[in-house]
Image (spheres, coloured by chain):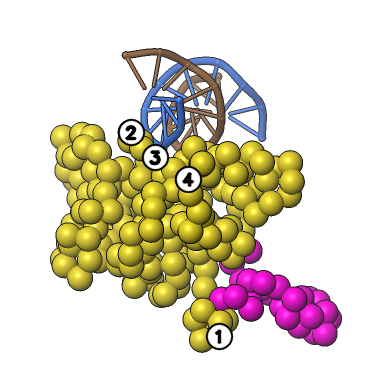
Chain colours: A yellow, B brown, C blue
Amino acid sequence: MPKPRKRLAGAAGPDKRASGKCPKTENLDEALAKVEKSNHWKTSAFKNHGKILNYWLMKSEPESRMEKGVDVKFSIEDLKAQPKQTACWDGVRNYQARNFLRTMKVEDEAFFYHSNCKQPGIVGLVKIVKEAYPDYTQFEKNNPHYDPSSKEDNPKWSMVDVQFVRMMKRFISLAELKAYHQAHRVTGGPLKNMALFIHQRLSVQPLTQEEFDFILSLEEMEPN
DNA sequence: GCCAACGTTGGC
DNA sequence: GCCAACGTTGGC
């Protein structure tokens, strides 16, 4: 069992994300029309045989940094080096980020983001291969993410397993994303509300279909 | 290394 | 329940 060390706390902000459509209080026709019109449904249906996926951005630190005597470095290269290129995403100690982990479904896709480093930005794509289960590091006394307030019979913190999918065709830097975000705030473009900029310290964050597709489309373009 | 942003803690 | 002090995140 791989035990990568990551530093993955995060921060919060209002939890604005709708994790699933819940039309029960609406008129059914209205609800269906809404679903029919939504790009989210159409695009993901084509991509994944009708199954609706959620999209995420997950931050990890690619450069060595000691926390309580343990190196918390975990880059996408480190993920690739794991057996089955799969690792558990341990160490998240922020409630909002944890709640997002608990929302994740097998096959959901996530951007792997390098943070707190020389070149922050999106480096690759991963997918969820195991849904939320208790993060064992909360019970390990000499783990940097040990949480003495968490009890075995009622764990506070969760983790998922992620598997490497591929590297981005090119590195998508934070600076580039920020430039689009700022332009889109004016023009109403797809990155106008990107969580990376609105919920600054959130280490696990949702992306809309539009945000995800737009960022993927950047791969085909020359960097600014 | 600096420091702004912002979540958490704990006294009251 | 308020809020000042403190700690962490993470870009620069």
What residue does disc 3 label? Answer: A120
Crowding near the residue tagged with mark 4, few <14, some 14–19, many ≥20 C-alpha atoms within 10 Å: few
- Magenta span includes A138: no
Residue A29 magenta: yes
**Quarter of the rendering occupied by the N terminus of chain A:** bottom left
- Label 3 close to label 2 by CB (< 8 Å): yes
Q: Nearer the viewer, residue A109 or A141?
A: A109
The residue lying at 82 percent from left, 85 percent from top is A29
Amino acid tagged 4: Pro
Q: Tell if the residue under mark 2 belongs to the same chain as the one under mark 1.
A: yes
Q: Secondary structure at mark 3?
A: loop
Residue that extends furthest to the front in the rendered view of this protein:
A222
Rendered position, A101 above or below A7: below
- Tell me which segment is drawn in magenta: A18-44
Say which residue label 4 marks.
A223
Residues at marks 3 and 1, CA–CA distance in whole angstroms: 34 Å
Residue A216, x across and y down, in percent: 50, 60
The subunit letter for the residue under badge 1 reads A
Local SS, label 4:
loop
Report x, y in % for residue A21: 66, 73
Which quadrant would residue A9 be assigned to in this image? top left
Query: Residue B4 appears at what percent x and percent y?
Result: 54, 22
